[in-house]
Amino acid sequence: GDHGAYQKVWDLDAASGVHEGFGCESLRDVRWRTVALVRVLEVQHEGKAIVLVSHGDALQILQTAFAGIPVREHRSLPHLNQAEVRELVKAY
């Protein structure tokens, strides 16, 4: 893919968590949607480990909720490698 296009979106992300530039879903909406999913899964699978598989950006955006940082700072988190397993601990 064109990594330059990604960088342009990430630059907008850093400035605003609500932009929809380049036809992208806003960071705020991605975070809301993914956190809502985790909450539903936690109820449905109480006491069990849950494995989430998705695109790196969506998971990194979700991780901001667990880390308690502004969503626009998602790129400040360590990069997720392909097939990486990362434990998330509630902070939301």
Image (cartoon, helix red, strand yellow):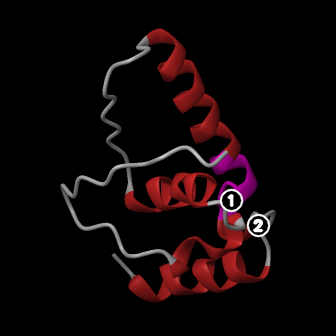
Question: For numbered disc 2, what is the local secondary structure?
Answer: loop
Question: For numbered disc 1, what is the local secondary structure?
Answer: helix
The spot of residue 12 in percent (x, y) is: 71, 80
Asked if residue 28 is among those painted magenta in the image, a careful observer would answer yes
The spot of residue 83 in percent (x, y) is: 18, 55
**What crowding class fits label 1: few (fewer than 14 Cα within 10 Å), some (14-19), or many (20 or more)?**
many
- Disc on the earlier residue, 2 or 1: 2
> Residue 87, relative to residue 60: is it above or below?
above
Q: Nearer the viewer, residue 81 or 86?
A: 86
> Residue 69, relative to residue 84: is it above or below?
below
The spot of residue 32 in percent (x, y) is: 70, 42
Majority SS type along the magenta span = helix
Residue at left offset 79%, top offset 67%: 19
Residue at left offset 39%, top offset 81%: 2
Which quadrant of the view contains residue 72?
bottom right
Q: Which residue is mark 2?
A: 17
Q: Are marks 2 and 1 in contact (CB under 8 Å)?
A: yes
Q: Which residue is mark 1?
A: 27
Give, as a three-letter code, the residue at label 2.
Gly
> Residue 61, relative to residue 70: is it above or below?
above
Give the residues drawn in magenta, as a range.
23-31
Which quadrant of the view contains residue 20?
bottom right
Asked if residue 5 is among those painted magenta in the image, a careful observer would answer no
Outermost residue, top side: 44
Give, as a three-letter code, the residue at label 1.
Leu
Measured Cα–Cα span from mark 2 to mark 1:
5 Å
